[in-house]
Image (cartoon, grey):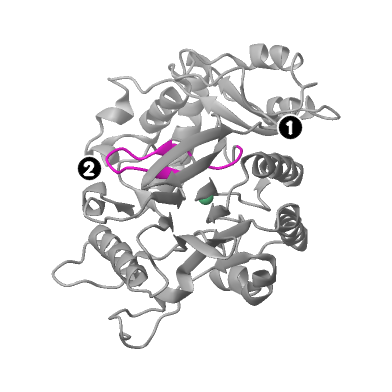
């Protein structure tokens, strides 16, 4: 069985006020060419089809046109799409009966029972068991598992660990599949998921997102046997997971954030005679993301405003998303910021914000030495003001300003 694995499309994303429509079209053209060349039996899309739960009509049109187009270039191609945390499960799944006519299976959510069924499960497992057929014969299965909230994985005895519950859930799916009369051991099994594996390389995800990821422990997955390929989505950096054979994140098809400045790809998977081979197929990025002049490690190697401004003129003609990095050796005025934004006017480069780098806090800064509330209260407004100035600007308040500030403080204190 041959599988093409992709994920995290994020159709409809607005990136710093810019639409990604053209980039999605560019990716779809590449994906189409890859499918024509690779001839997979099934295309697996592991969640985050759309960027938002209520995609615009433009985004939906883009998606529908592309999937219909794909199903027409190859009548034998099956497509399996599952929801991610960004998708609305019900909205994605609503056209499920219509999609069947195009050989497309969409799973937005599990259908839960109020009680356990004959196979001891609290949900309809058959709904997510997708047979992959070739010339009328079932050659394999996709266990199309959508994104699930941690609380929605069925509980198991003697453990509330989310990780163990996820592993037990997949195990129960495999048992259910293998009990089907139309299952035989010669068929390949692919399992999807939209989740975060604990030992994955999470570059591409900003710190605040990581905090929200429910991670699962790879040790808990070691006893889940029988899956030929794990097709995961959620983490945007394409990678194979260490410790489990053939478990991969396909990664996003192009940078969804400034943290994703790396090679993007899709995965071609061949499963035959119980052996799985994967090949990473690189994708081209239409519009590069650029940290300009470069991403400094901190205040010391950042460049001052005037230098950045001067160099900026050399690159604004190039089509790119540009985020500026400026050394805050003096506070930027509103006019400075405006001048930077205006440098992009009528140019191909797209302004995506300014990051300022302030001096490192030094030992001995007054404010740093304050440990308790009573110590803070003991500082006069003048002392406090001076230390805030020093902290922000990395140098002592100039004498002239100190005198003016002292005057203001005294005048304020005289007032009843
Ligand atoms: Mn995503």
Q: Toward which corner of the image does residue 15 lie, by quadrant?
A: top right
Residue at 70% x, 58% y: name it: 75
Q: For the point 43% across and 46% down, which residue is it?
A: 272
Residue labelled with disc 1: 350
Q: Which residue is mark 2?
A: 374
Going by the picture, which residue comes out furthest to the right?
346
Residue 98 lies left or right of residue 143; in this view the side is right
Front of the two marks 2 and 1: 1
Q: Nearer the viewer, residue 265 or 212?
A: 265
Q: Secondary structure at mark 1?
A: strand
Counting other residues with Cα less than 10 Å from the Cα at mark 2, is it few (<14), some (14-19), or many (20 or more)?
few
Q: Is residue 247 magenta?
A: yes
Q: How many numbered marks does the figure carry?
A: 2
71 or 220, which is in the foreground? 71
**Does residue 202 appear in this view?**
no
192 horizontally vs 28: left or right: left
Question: Is 92 left or right of 270, judged from the image as shown?
Answer: right
Q: Nearer the viewer, residue 43 or 166?
A: 43
Residue drawn at (22%, 36%) of the image = 371
From the top left corner, tell me how far across and down residue 7 is, in percent.
Answer: 54, 49
Going from N to C along the chain, the mark reached first, 2 or 1, is 1
**Residue 34 sits above or below residue 119 on the image:** above
Q: How far is the residue under mark 2 from the one under mark 1?
A: 49 Å
State which region is magenta: 237-254
Relative to 7, residue 409 above or below? above
Q: Of the numbered discs in the image, which one, if any, rests on residue 382?
A: none
Residue 112 in percent (x, y) is at: 41, 80
Taking the magenta stretch, the answer to whether it contains residue 295 is: no
């Amino acid at each position: 069985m041959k599988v093409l694995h992709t994920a995290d499309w994020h159709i409809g994303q607005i990136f710093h006020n810019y639409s990604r429509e053209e980039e999605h079209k560019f990716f779809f053209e590449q994906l189409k060419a890859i499918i024509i060349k690779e001839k997979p039996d099934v295309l697996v899309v592991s969640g985050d089809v759309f960027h938002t739960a209520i995609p615009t009509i433009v985004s939906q049109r883009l998606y529908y046109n592309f999937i219909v187009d794909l199903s027409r270039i190859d009548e034998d191609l099956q497509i399996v799409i599952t929801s991610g945390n960004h998708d609305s499960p019900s909205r994605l799944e609503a056209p499920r009966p219509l999609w069947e006519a195009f050989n497309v299976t969409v799973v937005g959510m599990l259908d839960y029972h109020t009680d356990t069924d004959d196979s001891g499960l609290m949900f309809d497992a058959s709904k997510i068991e997708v047979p992959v057929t070739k010339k009328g014969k079932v050659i394999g299965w996709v266990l199309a598992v959508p994104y699930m909230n941690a609380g929605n994985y069925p509980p198991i005895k003697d453990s509330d660990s989310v990780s163990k519950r996820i592993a037990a859930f997949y195990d129960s799916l495999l048992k259910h599949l293998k009990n089907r009369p139309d299952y035989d051991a010669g068929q390949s099994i692919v399992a999807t998921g939209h989740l975060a594996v604990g030992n994955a390389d999470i570059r591409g995800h900003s710190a605040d997102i990581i905090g929200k990821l429910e991670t699962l422990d790879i040790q808990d997955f070691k006893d889940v046997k029988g899956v030929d390929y794990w097709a995961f989505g959620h983490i945007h950096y394409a990678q194979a997971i260490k410790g489990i054979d053939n478990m991969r994140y396909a990664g996003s098809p192009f940078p969804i954030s400034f943290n994703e400045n790396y090679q993007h790809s899709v995965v071609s998977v061949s499963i035959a005679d119980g052996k799985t081979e994967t090949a990473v197929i690189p994708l081209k990025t239409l519009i590069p993301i650029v940290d300009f002049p470069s991403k400094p490690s901190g205040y010391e190697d950042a460049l001052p405003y005037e230098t950045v401004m001067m160099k900026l003129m050399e690159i604004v003609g190039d089509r790119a998303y540009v985020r500026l990095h400026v050394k805050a050796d003096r506070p930027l005025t509103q006019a400075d910021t405006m001048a930077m934004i205006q440098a992009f006017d009528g140019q191909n480069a797209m302004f995506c914000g300014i990051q300022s780098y302030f001096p490192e806090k030094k030992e001995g800064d007054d404010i740093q030495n304050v440990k308790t509330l009573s110590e803070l209260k003991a500082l006069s407004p003048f002392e406090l003001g001076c230390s805030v100035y020093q902290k922000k600007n990395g140098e002592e308040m100039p004498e002239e300003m100190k005198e003016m500030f002292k005057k203001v403080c005294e005048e304020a204190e005289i007032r009843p």
